[in-house]
Image: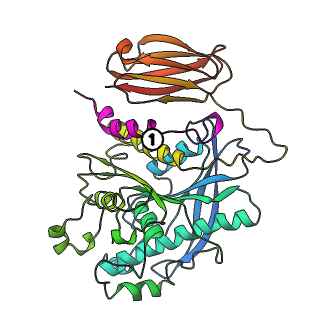
Amino acid sequence: MRNLYSLLCLSVFVFFFSNLQSQCSNGRYYDKIFSQSSSTVTFGNAMNFDSTFVDLKMDIYQPTGDNFLHRPLIVLAFPGSFTAGTRLSPDIITMCDNFSRRGYVCASIDYRLGFEGGSDCDTNQFKALMRAVQDMKAAVRFFYRDEQTTNTFRIDTNQIWIGGSSAGAFIGLNYAYGKVDTLSRSEPAWARPALDSLGGPEGNSGNPGYASKVKGVIDLCGAIADTVWMMPGDPILVGVHGTADATVSCYFDSVYASTHPESLLFGGGDIKNRLDHIPLNHFLYLFQGADHVPYILPIPFIPPASKYMDSTVWIVRDFLFQNTTCDSTQISGVEDVAYEISVSVFPNPSDDATVIYSHYNNDLTAEIFSVDGKIVTKKIVPAQSSQEISKQELGAGIYVIRMTDLKNSIHRTERIVFY
């Protein structure tokens, strides 16, 4: 029987690894070749539902020692149904850690929470969503302003990705695709006045006068009010959704929605169907039988959640890698980072063989362990070369490869699956 790991990953990785082409040297944007550091900044200030003003902060994660002058940016928002949550949400922190170590600048942002009078009526839910969209736009404008002034974070503003988890994905989807002049059904009478009362889609959360255009969306279990909003030429999209999601339905359910107006939404399955029928670059993977945000529930970082998180990271990684332009312009007079061991291992999972491709300047020793910690075999991966590992040699299962240089002074681990 195929294990859970293979079931989650197989179809997406067979597709992606057969199409991967290196965009940058040393594994940048694909491998975790950096360490990372983080800092907190205030990017805006805005009036909340209760007429109080709140500062909006974000934690910015950067690859340590990176000397590229123009770097892609990922801006992510946390889950919590627009009533709770924090920018320290473990799923968002995991994403930021993973992608900053691959060479992206990542930002985990605050956004305003809560409903007027504690009422979650349709109008108040819509206003909470739009306040959050305004706050994410202010965060993006912060980086446009930085790029045009101090250039502290060295962002390539042509390569900005937005999104998040659950409510955070709602924010990214509505930011990128929301349209007031394109609807497949009648607009609710309360929608336009509610939006106008907030100051329109751009809002007043901070950094006025700067652009808020983005390249793409990372949709982790989100939904959108109308899939017809998604048009050719719009931002591209990558994401995941569970087909058994009982919180944010993967597919529109007209029977349920008839008695639950807040469920007049279209989830990952409907979004995928829409994008499969228009010329818009995308990859949205559906976890069969999975509930809401399976990568963080019931317990973060412990199977099966950790396996869903691994798969989610890899799905996003592969799509971004294919769609990130490598501008290798470097800061004058600054030497490049001393990379960790940079390797690529693919195809993975595999039903036959996988190959370790080394981008390291010295030979590597690859020790392969079974999941119970026993060493199975040892191989040498020549400098700037490759070494094949076959299923016939190891058998079906999950294995861990520990790679070290010949002085045993630097190491890296990867997981591989043979099904």
Residue 262 image offset from top left, x and y in percent:
27, 72
The residue lying at 36 percent from left, 22 percent from top is 352
Image-based side of 136 in relation to 173, left or right: right
Image-based side of 339 in relation to 365, left or right: right
Mostly what secondary structure, the magenta segment? helix
Image-based side of 310 in relation to 321, left or right: left
Residue 260: quarter of image = bottom left
Q: Foreground: 363 or 311? A: 363
| Amino acid type at mark 1 | Trp
The residue lying at 29 percent from left, 34 percent from top is 4
The residue lying at 48 percent from left, 21 percent from top is 401
Residue 113 image offset from top left, x and y in percent:
44, 70
> Which stretch is magenta?
1-26
In this orientation, does residue 99 appear?
A: yes
Q: Foreground: 277 or 146? A: 277
The residue sitting at the left extreme is 255
In this orientation, does residue 301 appear?
A: no
In the displayed structure, 402 sits above or below 138; it is: above
> Can you identify the residue that label 1 sits on?
314
Q: Foreground: 118 or 149? A: 149
Residue 371 image offset from top left, x and y in percent:
37, 21
The residue lying at 71 percent from left, 55 percent from top is 154
Quarter that holds the N terminus? top left
Q: Is residue 299 magenta?
A: no
What is the secondary structure assignment of the residue under circle 1?
Answer: helix
Quarter that holds the C terminus? top left
Image-based side of 146 in relation to 44, left or right: right
Residue 355 image offset from top left, x and y in percent:
48, 23
